[in-house]
Image (spheres, rainbow, N blue to C red):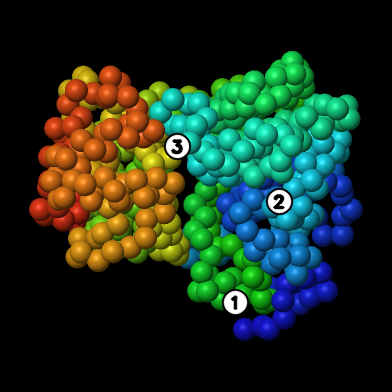
Amino acid sequence: MSSSRLNQETLARLASTARHSPLRGHAFGTGILHLGIGAFHRAHQAIFTQAAMAARPGDWGILGVSLRSPGVRDILAAQDHLYSVTTLAPGHQATQVVSVVKDVLYAPEDPSRVVAALADPAIKIVTLTITEKGYGQDPASGRRRRDDAAMGKDLDLSQAPRTALGFLLRGLLQRRQSAAGPITLLSCDNLPENGRVLAGLLREICAEAAQDLLPWLAEAVTCPSSMVDGIVPAATPASLRQAESYLGLRDEAAIVCEDFRQWVIEDNFAAERPAWEAAGAEIVSDVRPYETMKLRLLNGSHSALAYLGALGGYETIAETMADPRYKAFATRLMRTEAGPAISLPAGTDLLTYSQSLIRRFCNPALAHRTRQIAMDGSQKLPQRLLASLYGQLPSDRPMPCTLLAVAAWMYYVGGRDETGGSFKVHDPLAARFAALHAAAKGNTAAVVAAFLGVSEVFGPPARQPGALAGRLTESLTALRRDGARACVGRLADFPGSGP
């Protein structure tokens, strides 16, 4: 293993198993600002942008902005903003160096610099991967969360911004004032109609804090929706060593992920954009069928496997899928519950798509931890699982897999596994969920009733299907009595469950 670290000087020592960036030696300016420069963005939108620039040169370098930690900024700065992405599939590996990131800012350290960058006329596009909770949205109502203290403070324009929307609000105000030109705000997070959500939240906070910005917002800013797909596990010491063996250099920002990525983008841009279609992105008039398919089938089954897998003692999705009961369960969830309830994009076949997801989940080369996927469930459940459940229960369509998955989430956020061991729950409402479990004192029906009262997740009682409480109580009772593996096993056999 090499002790030399990846940077411009050491690139000449790149291993023969790795590819140089196709932009090597090219001079280009910065045209994209990205909020939330984590691993997913660097393995997804950055790759598409680099490939687009290789096909059609332009000033589309990326200025990354980290909102939570200076870690990514510090690591990339020490590597001249170079990093590697290794894709793995059974029997196949490919490693490439990425050089499209020009700089990274840590927002809390110098908020005014981030605001100034948003107002820079060279920046034509802002992309976002800030996770569902980063929008401060109440998933049930679609409005901003009134209990989000940071967003509430961001409405005071005399204060430095703290949230992504707070930075956008100030940047857009400054951009209008300096006549810097139109700009596209492109959400890449797992929210239904994420562009519409972003635009609605921006209008809402503008109406509260800067009403005079609204006409310019309507005239000069667009918020296309997009669907992103690609499994990118969090880095571990083992994955960094693995990347180093392929790269021939030490890369503290290395990403190891699956060999699949997809990006579907609504054709609604306020100004110029990279030739992302030359890199394989799909530019379409309506993203909704794609995002619904992905949220309900991929994300919904992924969350179900995460909660039921973690409760069953499995550390990764690949380990979970190696259990044939879980593989059959995920297949049933997609084919008989989530899939038939949605309109698939033209030319997409449910059987073929679900089979491709099963293959991806089974990829033994990826160590995608169940507990990583299980994070922030209160922000994910409405669009991933409850949308299917609410749409089908009133018609008495059997939904045993979806009900079991929701019950598993209720169990999981109690912070105890099936052996009685405790673990930390990562969720904006974690303290509230712990209190609900404590107050229920082990009574399953009381747990379900308390959770159904969390309107941010389940919506108001009037919107909940009448059979929901009883069905969830049955599923949670079975989980507590028999365990996740047994409950999954009972649902594994169904007509058409063969290969």
Q: Nearer the viewer, residue 198 or 331?
A: 198
First in sequence: mark 1 or mark 3?
1
The span from disc 1 to disc 3 (Cα, nearest Å) is 33 Å
Which of the two discs, 2 and 1, sits closer to the camera? 2
Residue 406, compared with residue 338, is above or below; it is below
Residue 349 locus on image (x, y percent) = 40, 32
Circle 2 sits in a helix, a strand or a loop, which is it?
Answer: helix
Asked whether disc 1 touches disc 3, contact meaning CB atoms under 8 Å apart, the reply is no
Residue 474 locus on image (x, y percent) = 12, 40
Residue lying at 75% horizontally and 18% vertically, measured from the top left: 212
Q: Indicate left or right for 387 with 294 as reference.
A: left
First in sequence: mark 3 or mark 2?
2
Binning the other alpha carbons within 10 Å of mark 3 as few (below 14), some (14 to 19) or many (20 upward) gives many
> Where the N terminus falls, by quadrant?
bottom right
- Mark 1 belongs to which amino acid? Ser
Residue lying at 20% horizontally and 64% vertically, measured from the top left: 420
Binning the other alpha carbons within 10 Å of mark 2 as few (below 14), some (14 to 19) or many (20 upward) gives many
Residue 343 locus on image (x, y percent) = 40, 23
Using the rendered image of the protein, determine whether residue 441 is visible from the camera's viewpoint: yes
Q: Indicate left or right for 360 with 327 as reference.
A: right
Residue lying at 27% horizontally and 52% vertically, measured from the top left: 414
The span from disc 3 to disc 2 (Cα, nearest Å) is 31 Å
- Mark 2 belongs to which amino acid? Ala
First in sequence: mark 2 or mark 1?
2
Circle 3 sits in a helix, a strand or a loop, which is it?
Answer: helix
* Disc marking residue 245: 1
Which residue is tagged 2? 107
Which residue is tagged 3? 294
